[in-house]
Amino acid sequence: MASATRTFARALRTSARPALSAVPRTAFRQSRFYSSEPAAKKSSSAWIWLVGGAAALSGGAYLYQNGAAAPSAFAPKFEDYQAVYNEIASRLEEKEDYDDGSYGPVLVRLAWHASGTYDKETGTGGSNGATMRFAPESEHGANAGLKVARDFLEPVKAKFPWITYSDLWILAGVCAIQEMLGPAIPYRPGRSDRDVSACTPDGRLPDAAQAQDHLRNIFYRMGFNDQEIVALAGAHALGRCHSNRSGYEGPWTFSPTVLTNDFFKLLTEEKWQWKKWNGPKQYEDKKTKTLMMLPADMALVQDKKFNEWVKKYAADNDLFFKDFSAVIVKLFELGVPFKEGQERWVFKTSA
């Protein structure tokens, strides 16, 4: 079923993307999705909204031969990383009962949260280190539910022991985006794993309950501008919130396992109202009451400068894809000391 689903979804890449938002959600149950949000701790509303020792060489040098130690150093090449990509892609839909049928969205979130801790002033945080493996970072409210993603990747790490966790988590995010019909995401290895001493403090990820000033404070700290903030928010076309993690509940779009510009289209075209329930403040669409938006999402249309880009992306999926690809690469590479001359690669997607 999973293989047939991917084949069907792939066929939609060039023929049906603009119409996806008009298709009932049930039609995409077989198309795959995401899910997993921040926990309901002190920072529980933090970003739903919007991952051992140091290794050498790009991706880490490892004494490797047929999966075991060997007398010569193994220097991974593009085809080795493509093999890792293929392994992840083949397992995205292995459990029909997980969320909307795909681990893709939660892998995107893992890569996002591992990278979004970067601070340009101190040079700390970011995807170089994979410090979410350790407490207290693994227990931050914003990272609730991400153990699912980390555990999902453990068999992949065991099969390809030469790759660092840091490179693996980002490669998984790249794979998930591309396999969910998103744009090509160039990737380059070179991250090393760090120990618990490199864990970042809580509060570096966006808080879904906040508005535009908070968003700018968080993203400007990483080095992003207003246009890039909005483009990154487009990832909310994927996945859903969980009341037992972030406190919030529901998907942003009708097709949470297919990346489109629907997040922006729904923000601008639907009418939204406060949801009447016992949970934290969130919006629901008036028409079906099945979709949700967070206060931080609505800030994008309430702020004049942000809204200019929301409208542009709502009207042009190709523009969104172009800008999203560029800014997600920037996010994934923040603070990484790549080897000079390390080229970026684009992986071939599954059939």
Image (spheres, rainbow, N blue to C red):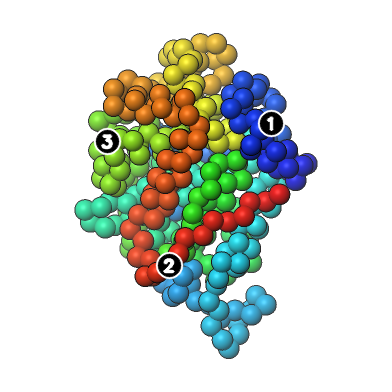
Residue 195 makes an appearance in the image? no
Alpha-carbon distance for marks 2 and 1? 39 Å
Residue found at the very far bottom of the displayed protein: 71
Q: Do the residues labelled 3 and 1 touch (CB within 8 Å)?
A: no
Q: How far across and how far down the image is residue 55, in percent?
A: 44, 73
Tag 2, which secondary structure? loop
Separation of residues labelled 3 and 1 (CA atoms): 35 Å
Contact flag, marks 3 and 2 (Cβ < 8 Å): no
Tell me what residue is drawn at x 39 percent, y 60 percent: 128
Q: Which residue is tagged 2? A: 342
* Depth check, front residue: 181 or 138: 181
Dot 3: few (<14), some (14–19), or many (≥20) neighbours within 10 Å? some
Query: Disc 3 residue type?
Result: Arg
In the depicted view, which residue is nearer to us: 247 or 127? 127
Callout 2 touching callout 1 (CB < 8 Å): no
Q: Is mark 1 on a helix, strand or loop?
A: loop
Q: Which of marks 2 and 1 is in front?
A: 2
- The location of residue 290, given as percent across then percent down, is 57, 19
Q: Is residue 29 above or below residue 302?
A: below
Disc number lying in front (3 or 2): 2
**Residue 169: x percent and y percent?**
50, 56
**Residue 65 screen position, x and y as percent:** 64, 80
Residue 300 in the image: above or below residue 196: above
Q: Is mark 3 on a helix, strand or loop?
A: helix
Residue at image coords 49%, 39%: 321
Horizontal side of residue 14 vs 295, given as left or right: right
Outermost residue, left side? 121
Say above or below: 78 vs 74.
above
Picture disc at residue 216: 3
Disc 1 marks which residue?
Answer: 29
Q: Quadrant location of the N terminus? A: top right
